[in-house]
Image (spheres, coloured by chain):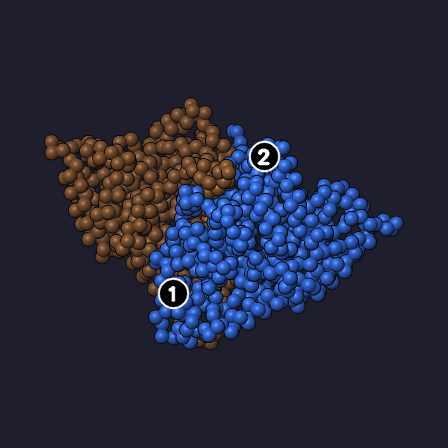
Chain colours: A brown, B blue
Amino acid sequence: MSSKPLDYENLNENVKKTQYAVRGELYLRASELQKEGKKIIFTNVGNPHALGQKPLTFPRQVIALCQAPFLLDDPNVGLIFPADAIAKAKQFLAMTSGGLGAYSDSRGIPGVRKLVAEFIEGRDGYPSDPELIFLTDGASKGVMQILNSVIRDPSDGILVPVPQYPLYSASIQLLGGSLVPYYLEETANWGLDINDLRQSVEQARYKGITVRAMVIINPGNPTGQCLSVANIKQIIQFCHQENLVLLGDEVYQQNIYQDERPFISARKVLFDMGPPISKELQLVSFHTVSKGYWGECGQRGGYFEMTNISPRAVEEIYKIASISLSPNVPGQIFMGLMVNPPKPGDISYDQFVRESKGILESLRKRARIMTDGFNSCRNVVCNFTEGAMYSFPQIRLPPRAIEAAKKLGKVPDVFYCLRLLEATGISTVPGSGFGQKEGVFHLRTTILPAEEDMPAIMDSFKKFNDEFMEQYEDHRGYSRM
Amino acid sequence: MSSKPLDYENLNENVKKTQYAVRGELYLRASELQKEGKKIIFTNVGNPHALGQKPLTFPRQVIALCQAPFLLDDPNVGLIFPADAIAKAKQFLAMTSGGLGAYSDSRGIPGVRKLVAEFIEGRDGYPSDPELIFLTDGASKGVMQILNSVIRDPSDGILVPVPQYPLYSASIQLLGGSLVPYYLEETANWGLDINDLRQSVEQARYKGITVRAMVIINPGNPTGQCLSVANIKQIIQFCHQENLVLLGDEVYQQNIYQDERPFISARKVLFDMGPPISKELQLVSFHTVSKGYWGECGQRGGYFEMTNISPRAVEEIYKIASISLSPNVPGQIFMGLMVNPPKPGDISYDQFVRESKGILESLRKRARIMTDGFNSCRNVVCNFTEGAMYSFPQIRLPPRAIEAAKKLGKVPDVFYCLRLLEATGISTVPGSGFGQKEGVFHLRTTILPAEEDMPAIMDSFKKFNDEFMEQYEDHRGYSRM
């Protein structure tokens, strides 16, 4: 009998070609070790609650009440829920057509989209149209929807920063398009040089690729940098000149750990530039409830906002969203809560502020502990994590370590990260999963382990690393950039 | 300036080609009319809670507690939550790694997948392996994942029943495959004739299409029939002979409204047939929390189970699932609750049984009222809804009505359904959205309006229909099958 339709050799080639490192070899090995009883510190995914971050109380109270609307009539409800959570739950339930168990419109609940529009307007100072905001099951699903509309065939190219979050490489592979890399400059704190960008596009065109879109991740993942307004302006001008749609992955907009470069959205910079460009450049911006100080990854709530996209194209995107009926409704409510948090004077305001500040301040400290820790290690250099949730240290592997990896058929940074995992239980993602310059090696770790555990984790990392370097360095000294 | 990347003319052709009728022209018009203040009865989507079905109390109590884990330590929690809901919430929280705010494994929470496996074993009498069960954001997402693995290019064909639920046609178009229709026979109560099936495959092959998979929807959507064991056996043999993977959409397995043909899963029939076929046929079965007496559509919980799929292919499907990190966690807990409901002796058992029986018995009555109502109308014939949530009456349109539709550039059944909507507010889906034989017309409506509203709705339908027929029939009599 011939092989069967769902046998490996008969699967869709794009499925097989797709690579996804965040849950790749390292993660699988970590899961195995965990099953065998080893204590694993999962820093491979930005998953704060998995590392002990407590959920914010107020939104969880509201969502619990929305899930159990019969409690709203219970005379005892006030004993365990504050009055503002009860009022908010009623307000959100009134926006649904049938509560959390009913499909919403495929673009999301109109009332929540209106709240998102108000949030964007408040943030940027320019009005936003709820009709151009679609709610999604997390930002990833939104990115995939938009890329699916953009990519027509393998000659369509998408500019993606390298190092990049592999959602982009994986989605582009799966959808059968071409990834066009542009390199971020590590020595310039992961900055972006427009001349390099221009070169990337020219090289791609030379290969017959039509570059159609450019992705920016701001704050950066895995690189943690925050883009300056000047840089965003250049990017916008570049996209306009080259007729690219700009995809702004801004899911870490609340995760900022320095004061020099606050988050400014691509949309605000675009509108500040004024016409004609502000009326012409196509921009899609993404956001989520998974990051920020919420970290509600498991709820899968997100949105994208479209700027300068024609109604006819919006309709097509709506039609495709309709096929899977609606994003999950509880996740939509979380999004509504995130963009419309308790206000001064509300019963829950003080608690909400205390909890959210506590998380952000601790993340700020952890970013510092981690960067300093890495920089204290032999052959490791690391830019400061200005934003997002990651550290992306460069690991200068000695030639003998690279040889040892090759003998085992492993990419050198995979070899290093596997050794780190076995020695310490720290589960990271090798830099090769994000892309890096030839012959340069990194790893990505989140800054999410609990603050009190951080010193011990960094000590354990340093001990492993320095011994590893000791083992593989030839003692004539090693100094390679 | 040339047109922009996200302008309509530059979008992915598969996106543009994709049709999706459930939220198509009729739905859009209904939404407009609603905005204008008209009362609309949305029977276009199987969305029970939107039509007033109350959620089951126990699972909502459990999920509320999972969302608000801090309540578990509140001394007053017992005043508004029963002890078994509290215990169950603790049990599910212990299965997560970080509560509902943490991403789970991309296949879903291991503990929930184990519960699903136990449910399947209890239902079918054959053990099930949790490693071959993936949780999904509703069944639709699972179907799309599997089709994405199967479809390689336009020469790959998928056998789909006609009439069909347009998730299939839309997903196949979007993924660039070919839909190979097989017709269900209305006069045989929407039964399936294996000889017709064989003919469909031969015709497709003649056109150069490699048929790779066959979809069955049991109980049927939109047609409401329940497949007999004999029929499923024939289908399995056919798929085995033709080397097709069988995709069993069994999301309505709890929605059965007659006693002659209880639901039997394709998997049970397969295993009853014994080796070699039971060890060879590739089968993927889909289920959801959106249907049954749960109707928790907005929660987006689902699963698929793979049978006779090799580990290497399972790994590929896992990798693709990883890109969007994890299905929403609350939806996973709903699935865990659905497959593991309260048991006799539990505090909440009686209430749970009362609520679920109430819903199912009422659906059974509504199926009967609706079928009888349609059959009392001029030029309307309708098979009894044996299962699922839909009625799919045939509307025998007079030639003059067909001409009137053509003059307006409308498909005849779209014309009829639009007229019905304007006259009565009843929002249905034209049969052409599901596929039907040439020159035969239908509409699909759910059986979900509240039981007490049903007689008035059917009266209003009858009044519209009979006047419509009166208007367009030539009075020499009309008798076309």
* Residue found at the very far right of the displayed protein: B476
Q: Which residue is mark 1?
A: B91
Residue B462: x, y in percent? 75, 59
Residue A110: x, y in percent? 53, 54
Asked whether the beta carbons under mark 1 and mark 2 sit within 8 Å of each other, the answer is no
Nearest the viewer among A261 and A443 is A443
Left or right: B202 as drawn, with respect to A397: right
* Residue found at the very far top of the displayed protein: A206
The secondary structure type at the circle numbered 2 is loop
- Amino acid type, callout 2: Ile
Chain letter of the residue beneath label 2 in the structure image = B
Residue at 43% from the left image edge and 38% from the top image edge: A16
Chain letter of the residue beneath label 1 in the structure image = B
Q: Which residue is mark 2?
A: B209
In the depicted structure, whether residue A372 falls above or below residue A190: below
Q: Earlier in the sequence, mark 1 or mark 2?
A: 1
Residue at 47% from the left image edge and 49% from the top image edge: B306
Q: Specify whether disc 1 shares its chain with disc 2.
A: yes
Asked whether residue B268 is in view, the answer is yes
Residue A289: x, y in percent? 40, 53
Q: Which mark is residue A206?
A: none
Report crowding for label 1: few under 14, some 14 to 19, many 20 or more residues within 10 A (C-alpha): some
